[in-house]
Image: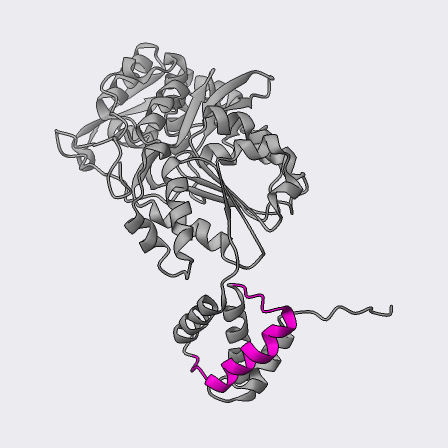
Amino acid sequence: MTASSSVTPPPVPARLEDMALSPVMMRDILLKTMFRRNVCEVTEVARAICLPRAVTQELVDIARGQRLLEATGTLNANSGNEMGYQLTDAGKARAMDALAQSEYFGAMPVPLDVYREQVKRQSIKNLNISRTELTRAMGHLILPPTLLDQLGPAVGAGRSILMYGPPGNGKSSISNGIRDAMGDKIYVPRAIEYSGQVITVYDPIVHSAAEEQTDDPTQLRRRTKYDTRYVMCDRPTVVTGGELKLDMLDLVFNPTARTYQAPLQLKSTGGIFIVDDLGRQDDPPQALVNRWIVPLEEGRDILALQSGEKFEVPFDTLVIFSTNSHPNEIFDQAALRRIFFKIKIDGPDQEDFLKIFALVARKKKMPLDEEALIHLLDTKYPTIDNVYANYQPVFLIDQMISICAFEGIPNQMSPALIDRAWSNMFVKDEHIVK
C-alpha cells in the first residue's frame, strides 16, 4: 500500500447482531441519546448514534417491545413522512438510570476486537512511502543526500526511530516532513468498547477529519460506504515535548461522566507519535523508553481500567524520538536495542548553510549582500569554530528584518546589521552580580 492508495474501510453493519455489542448497552445508548438530544425520527436517531437506519429501526423496535418507546402517532412531512417516537415514562426512568451509570451517549462504540481488525487493515506497517513521496514532503528542507537514504527505510518499516544531534538542525521539521509524506486516509473510531466500558478515541485536536459522508434521508437506498462509527481522517500525528509525563500514556477516567478517554499513543494508532526534546521531561528518558518496550517489540500495549483490570490494545504507531543528547548518555544498551533506527542529524556544512540562507532570504524578501555574507562567514562564524546550524539563517534574517523595520529602512543586510543580529543569537557567558 503506497501513501497515495486507500485503505479498506470498515464494513457497514447490516443487522443488529453484526454489532457484537451487548443489546442492553445498545438499547441504553439509544435511550440516552434520544433523551439528551431530543431526537425522535429514526433517521435522526440513526445519524446521532452513527448506525444504518435499518439497524437503528431494530433497536427502536426492541425498545418499543419493552415499553420504553412509543410512537407519537404523527408523521413528519419534512422527514419523508417518518413516524416519530418518544420515550415513555419507563423509558425516561431507564435513560436516567443509564446516565447515572455512564454519561456517554451518541455514537455507538466499536468493540475492541472489531477495531483490532480495522487496525490491521490500515496498519502503518503496510504503508510503503517511495523516495519520490518522501523527497516531495521534505522539499522545503535542505538535507544531505544520504539522510533520505536512512529515513526512507526507517519510515517504510513503520518501526521506531531515534533522531539525535545538536539542537536547531531540523529534527522536528524532519519529523513533520515524515508526517506529510503519509498522504492516505484511515478510519478512527469515535469510541471503542471493552468489558462494557466506553473509551473515546476520536479527538478533533489530534485527528484531521476528511469530509464526512452524508446520505439523503428521502432516498430509499442508502449509499453509506463505511461504518460511520468511524471518522475518515488523515493519519494522525501526536507531538509531545517536555510536557510529556508517564501518566499521560494511561487511560484517562472522567469520574463525572464515568467514561474513559484514550491515551495519546492509542489516539495516534495508524500514524506517528513524536516525542520531541527527549531528555527535557520530568521523567528520565530511560523510564519513558522502558514504558514503550512491550509496545515497540510486540505491537500491543497494556492499559488498565479503574477497577485495576488490565487489557491489551493494538499498538500500531511509528514512534519518533528526537533528542539533542547523545543516545549513550540517556539510554542503556537494552533500551537502544528496542529502538530500531538511530539517525544522527548533523548541522549543515558551509555549502548547505549558504543554500539555506539564500532560500530563507528569498522567501522573506531579504536581498542578499555579498559583503555581508563574507563578513558573516569570515568574521562571525570563526568565533564559534565554524559550527553551522539549520535554525541560524531564519534567526539572523528575522533579526535583520526587525531591525530594518525599527530603523524605518527597506529590508537589507550589511556587516553592521549582521553584527546586530548576531549579538542576539548567543548570550555572553559572564557572571552577573546580584
Q: Hey, which residue is sitting farthest left in the picture?
A: 220
Q: Main secondary structure of the magenta part?
A: helix
Q: Evaluate whether residue 199 shows in this view.
A: yes
Q: Hey, which residue is sitting farthest right in the picture?
A: 434
Q: Would you identify the image quadrant in which residue 227 lies?
A: top left
Q: Position of residue 129 (x, y in %)?
A: 31, 43
Please tell me whether residue 263 belongs to the stretch shown in magenta.
no
Question: Which residue is found at the position 13% from the left and 29% from the top?
Answer: 221
Q: In the image shown, does 322 or 281 lie closer to the viewer?
A: 322
Q: Would you identify the image quadrant in which residue 76 lies?
A: top left
Q: In the image shown, does 344 or 358 lie closer to the viewer?
A: 344
Q: Point out the image quarter for the C terminus.
A: bottom right
429 on left or right of 306? right
Question: Which residue is found at the position 44% from the left and 79% from the top?
Answer: 366
Read off the magenta span. Answer: 366-389
Q: Point out the image quarter for the N terminus.
A: top left
- Residue 7 vs 377, above or below: the answer is above
Q: Would you identify the image quadrant in which residue 17 lies?
A: top left
Question: Which residue is found at the position 44% from the left and 17% from the top?
Answer: 94
Q: Position of residue 413 (x, y in %)?
A: 50, 84
Q: Position of residue 316 (x, y in %)?
A: 42, 31
- Residue 39 vs 196, above or below: the answer is below
Q: Position of residue 108 (x, y in %)?
A: 37, 25
- Residue 223 vs 136, above or below: the answer is above
Please tell me whether residue 369 belongs to the stretch shown in magenta.
yes
